[in-house]
Image: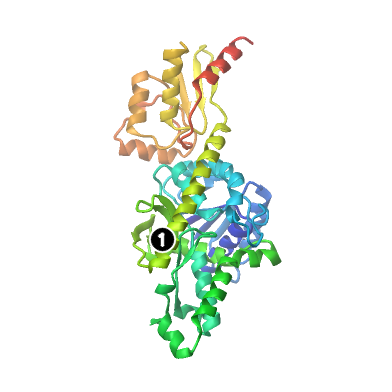
Amino acid sequence: MKVGVIGVGHVGGDAALSMALRGSCRELVLIDADRQLAVSQALDLAQTSALASGPKVRAGDYQDLAGAEVVVLAPGINEKAGGADKPGDKEGRLRLLDTNVPIFCDVVPKTIAAAPDATLLVASNPLDVMTELTRRLAGGKAVLGTGTFLDSIRFRTALAEHLEVAPECVSAVVVGEHGLTSVLLWSAVTIGGVSLESYLAQRGVERKFLKKAVEEYVKQGNINIIRGKGASEFAIGTVIARVVEAIVRDERIVIPCSCYSEEYGVTLSLLHRVGRRGVLDEFEIEGNQEEQEGIQRSVGALKAAMERLNRKFETARSLVPRPQFVRDEGNEVGMIAYGTTHHAAIETIDQLETEYGVKVDYLRLRAYPFTRETHDFIAKHKWVYVIDQNRDGQMRDLLKLDLAIEDIPKLRSVRHYNGLPIDARSITDDIISQEGK
């Protein structure tokens, strides 16, 4: 069982440590924009193996994710670095959106290309927004976020402390946004199977003061930690490890995690059954009226955040490098499209030929997946289709489609896919300027 972690700073690094100590997987690949950080983290983790029978750990690059069952996405800045660590801040983790969206637009397509069958587990903030962005970029792949699983652990911990019981005896769930509008489901709390109301009555505990103290502990949990050490890392690292275990072992546990909800029309945390391939089911929340109203407020806040994501996503897409055009030895025009789908490339080439009179003789397109539609289009135009990595995965796709290898003259492999559009007018200008040199 191979697991990858992208972004091995505070959160990703501690997730890797938790997985190593818990034996969550057999192989762990660490990737970071700071290559030396990934190397150092892997070296440090490897040295725990003499005392803990953990996985084989190594630093790597995206191609090393091939065959991974789960990839944890934890790149980007955290609350401290992004200025989201101030008590009473009405924006909270959403302050990180502008910085982290472009990072995910770069990371997710590369991850999909290298590990097309992996479940993607998002751990970067703003959590629900980054999970939604990953869902869009992943094109139907299995995606979920840690969501309010961490909030729920904090809820259980706070209740256990105030009620003087072991945390494992407490059942308590937080749903909605992993952020300022999260909803603590007080009506569903039980202590060793005993309802909270019954437990409080028998112990003589005042509910009003308990609720105030616990909610402050849960909703300010990350800020109280960041204030002293700069990052929340141990608990979220353990949460990530636990979710990874549920996926690779197909445990089918029921936890609150972030996933797109058809019912609410937004990505948020609800109770889900999680096993191999991520989220298997979503369960209806049977809260009281106050809790249902809280969920609706959370949905409203997240929809507003998604509107902001839409604007940022369009900006991030415009920053992706445009396709390059080259002339080979036979003086043919070739298109090299990076970071785009075959659909977008095909539309652009049609536009180039019909509107601008630029004939494209062959296409080198880094895209995933290789579909029947892609094959039919290329076969129709008699183009050479060259792809660049993950040859084994490409061959499997061809076999599924029952295609002959000779159908593709220079087939090599698959690279990546993220649904970014191409501007035909600017491409034509590039060709004209190149020819004028």
Give whichever of 28, 348 is nearer the camera.
Answer: 348
Residue to which mark 1 is pinned? 270
Q: Residue furthest right?
A: 228
In the rendered view, tell whether residue 156 sits above or below residue 181: below
Q: Where is residue 346 shown, x and y percent of the image? A: 42, 24
Could you classify mark 1 by the number of other residues whose Cα lies within 10 Å: few (under 14), some (14-19), or many (20 or more)? many
Give residue 214's quadrant in the image: bottom right
Q: Quadrant of the N terminus?
A: bottom left
Q: Where is residue 416 shown, x and y percent of the image? A: 48, 37
Please give left or right for residue 40 compared with residue 143 in the image.
right
Q: Secondary structure at mark 1?
A: strand
Give whichever of 135, 95 is nearer the camera.
Answer: 95
* Residue in view at x 36 percent, y 38 percent: 397
In the rendered view, tell whether residue 233 sits above or below residue 208: above
* Residue in view at x 66 percent, y 52 percent: 82
For the question of whether residue 360 can be seen, the reply is no
Q: Quadrant of the C terminus?
A: top right
Q: Amino acid at mark 1?
A: Leu
